[in-house]
Image (tube, helix red, strand yellow):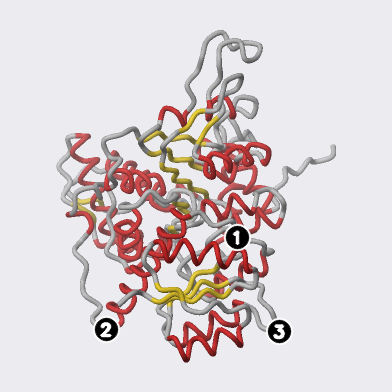
Amino acid sequence: MKTRILIVEDQSVEANNLKIILQKAGYHVCSIAISVAQALVILENEKPDLALLDIQLKGNQTGIDLAHMLAARNIAFIFLSANSDAATLKLAKESCPYGFLLKPFRQKEVLVMMDVAFYLHQQKQEQSLTAPRRQPARTKPGYENILGESAAMKSVFSQLEIVSQTDTSVLILGESGTGKELIANAIHRLSKRSHKPFVIVNCGTLPANLIESQLFGHEKGAFTGAYEKQIGKFEQADGGTIFLDEVGELPVDLQVKFLRVLQEREIEPIGGKRKPIHVRVIAATNRNLEEEMAAGRFRMDLYYRLNIFPIHMPPLRERREDIIALAEHFVAQLAARERKHIEGLSDAAKESLLSYHWPGNIRELQNMMERSVLLCTSTLIPSIPLAATHSSRIKSSDTLKTFSENERDHILAVLEKTQWKIFGPGGAAELLELNGSTLQSKMKKLGIEKRITQK
């Protein structure tokens, strides 16, 4: 029996285009609804397995209203509309859809999203019934250096298994130091592109006047100083995967050209002709792109193109059950490198690790373990030098600060130590292991300004 799909879309051209794509792929398309009222009648009469919902519909109710009704009936759904403001997008995400599809619809994106939605829905059903224990990911080929038995990481591993077998774009979201690059690398290694290049581009470190040339390349003589032809990062990754870290740092004018690459699968080097490329795009950011869209710093159409399959990397403070395993892994690794015989961590050291809030996440933990290994003179690491980070263990509730307050205090302390030097060797960005522009963005967000004392 064919899988039944309900389309709820008040634009007939869009609805019919979608219907043709689905029917060619072997789906049975139910009657098309243009309002919530019509959709409810079709739900009763035709019993669809999945619904594709536009957000703005005819009548007083929206696709978001219908989404909550579908969730109550345990019917999977995907949103279609991209023409929504940040507030509407937030409401749509709160209904927990299996994804968003951007108009105009492209066959490959539609069919990949359908497969993903059905897989996730099936997994959700099975987990609610049996909740089987997953094999530890660290024992599986392709997951090297990614450790975690927490529920949050098991969810990440489940998503990796799904998306690695497709060519769809992936957006990895999470704070600095959570391991976004490791996840991108794992997706590439587990994919059918694993024997092709994996090219990493940190968008936050590219010089503003050379970003386009670095990404798309240029011909000899294309501009002053272009003494020879340069192959851009996208062309270097042809056939493989390109990982765009800190994609939220891309200038708006370049976002338009990046969007064209995603849509048309071709690049145009500076001074050259357009050429097709076959590359899988994985992007990552520590920014809130919805806030960036609302502020006009990130294009909504690009967001939807990238956000086909988002993966949220949890901060270390939300996966405390993984902290000791990660710490012991780093200790073993670093002790071997330093040719030291260290068996592990003392109980006091473990207690310190579990009580710390880890604003720098896994990267901070790794650095802390390296320092501890270097200082260790026995077979057990006796204590952890947390005081060196201008932070301490979590104290009683009357002295607790929010994460943002702790982050602000930590950044201020480092800035004072570096005499407010941000860039370059010995600067605050280097000590915090952040890109300079990322640090400036955090300072602006947290209201950090250098005080000038009048003499």
Identify the element where label 1 is drawn: helix
- Label 2 to label 1, Cα distance in Å? 41 Å
Mark 2 sits on what residue? Answer: 129
Percent x, y of residue 115: 36, 63
Please determine whether, in this image, residue 434 is positioned above or below residue 302.
Answer: above
Residue visible at 50% across and 38% down in the picture: 431
Mark 3 sits on what residue? Answer: 60
Q: Quadrant of residue 33?
A: bottom right
Percent x, y of residue 41: 54, 90
Identify the element where label 3 is drawn: loop
* Observer-nearest of 156 and 223: 223
Residue visible at 40% across and 73% down in the picture: 28
Please determine whether, in this image, residue 185 is positioned above or below residue 151.
Answer: above
Percent x, y of residue 403: 55, 62
Mark 1 sits on what residue? Answer: 405
Q: Quadrant of residue 123?
A: bottom left
- Label 3 to label 1, Cα distance in Å? 43 Å
Q: Amino acid at mark 2?
A: Leu
Residue visible at 41% across and 27% down in the picture: 236
* Observer-nearest of 219 and 103: 103
Identify the element where label 2 is drawn: helix
Q: Amino acid at mark 3?
A: Asn
Mark toward the start of the polypeptide (2 vs 3): 3
Comparing labels 3 and 1, the label whose residue is closer to the camera: 3
Residue visible at 78% across and 40% down in the picture: 452
Please determine whether, in this image, residue 113 is positioned above or below residue 447.
Answer: below
Which disc, if any, is residue 302?
Answer: none
